[in-house]
Amino acid sequence: MDLLNTLVDKGLRRELPSREEALAVLATADDDLLDVVAAAGKVRRQWFGRRVKLNYLVNLKSGLCPEDCSYCSQRLGSKAEILKYTWIKPDEASQAAAAGLAGGAKRVCLVASGRGPTDRDVDRVTDTIKAIKDQNEGVEVCACLGLLSDGQAERLRAAGADAYNHNLNTSEGTYADITTTHTYADRVDTVQKAHAAGLSACSGLIAGMGESDEDLVDVVFSLRELDPDSVPVNFLIPFEGTPLAKEWNLTPQRCLRILAMVRFVCPDVEVRIAGGREVHLRSMQPLALHLANSIFLGDYLTSEGQAGKADLDMIADAGFEVEGADQVTLPEHRAGGCHGHEGAGVCGPAGSAQGAAGCGSAGSGQGEGGCGSAGSAQADGGFGSTVPAPVNEPRPDLVAVRRRGTGTDLAPNA
């Protein structure tokens, strides 16, 4: 296809596709899906080889969020029967992080539900960051705490945080349809604060909320302009007890096309498959590794993922390798400082240095991918049966609420 040849050439040169080209990727037929995956895979391999970065979520504070994000199991008024607990102690967080690192993760993502941190909350998180870094040499730490106030990003950076996650989630034009307690501009402001403080910015999206192809392209183009180092792609987990519980409109093929479009628009950034991969990609997960170069290991914030060992087996069986702690995630031209792209737009405010690759998953959006704050997303990828589901047919059996790990007496899944 001429379209795919053009997109590969642009991706290898880090050139921005046109909106029409991005929309055309989402509109490709299922008969052409493997061609789309193969084309985007060439771009992925150019910048990231066959490495897969593993990230591990630690939910520092779960549930009871005052924000009303429709997709979130931790939202105000949520009836989802998730774990609810207040701030865990730094040593508990460090123990949880150690489990993920032992399983092969190189980055730990610290997430807390809520609109945004108070200064006291920032103190708690800085203590936690120090505890984790003192006990785990070389670990990368990403924070996801919601909307930041002036000076808080700088404090997190001074404490040793490497990255900050806050997802845009959906297009500016439809944002008010999913959240009313804060704005799209609030989220952009927080990503810019992270950039300016020298943190590696991580910001992504949630697909499957009933948005149009145009909405998906809008948010991905907005992300390219913000220029984060990491773009987590979350697939909505329709939790029972949330307003979007009946939004079961993703197929594995649709998810793969979305990931391919993100890779073509953001060719040299860390694209992470975040919340919902087990639920919506199901047995097609290995194909997605040809598009994304990063995943979460084990469980998510409020839902369970597939077994950590299954993740590692999947990576090996698909011919990929786990990225080592001594390997740099980002291509050399993105590894530090400003890195504006042709046709892309801005670098971090004030020419901020961005450091290492940013973290995701859902306050990101759901998977953290995200974050559980400020309209956190679920950051979840619950896992149950892998029987394919017809489009628009509810599959509550695919969503398993997390009952192990942080906030419980059971061992974590890593």
Image (tube, grey):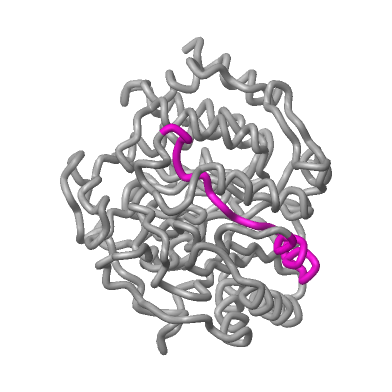
Given residues 63 and 411, the one toward you in this image is 63
Q: Residue 79, relative to residue 245: is it above or below?
A: below
Given residues 372 and 283, the one toward you in this image is 372
- Residue 86, image x, y percentages: 47, 81
Residue at 64 percent of width and 20 percent of height: 10
Quarter assignment of residue 383: bottom left
Q: Residue 395, relative to residue 129: is it above or below?
A: above
Residue 63 is a magenta residue? no
For residue 187, say whether it is visible.
yes
Residue at 23 percent of width and 53 percent of height: 245
Q: Is residue 9 left or right of residue 185?
A: right
Quarter assignment of residue 69: bottom left
Given residues 162 and 315, the one toward you in this image is 162
- Residue 258, image x, y percentages: 43, 34
As drawn, which residue projects farthest toward the top?
Answer: 2
Given residues 86 and 269, the one toward you in this image is 86
Quarter assignment of residue 347: top right
**Which region is colored magenta?**
151-173
- Residue 265, image x, y percentages: 57, 29
Q: Is residue 291 left or right of residue 120?
A: left
Residue at 80 percent of width and 67 percent of height: 158
Residue 152 is a magenta residue? yes
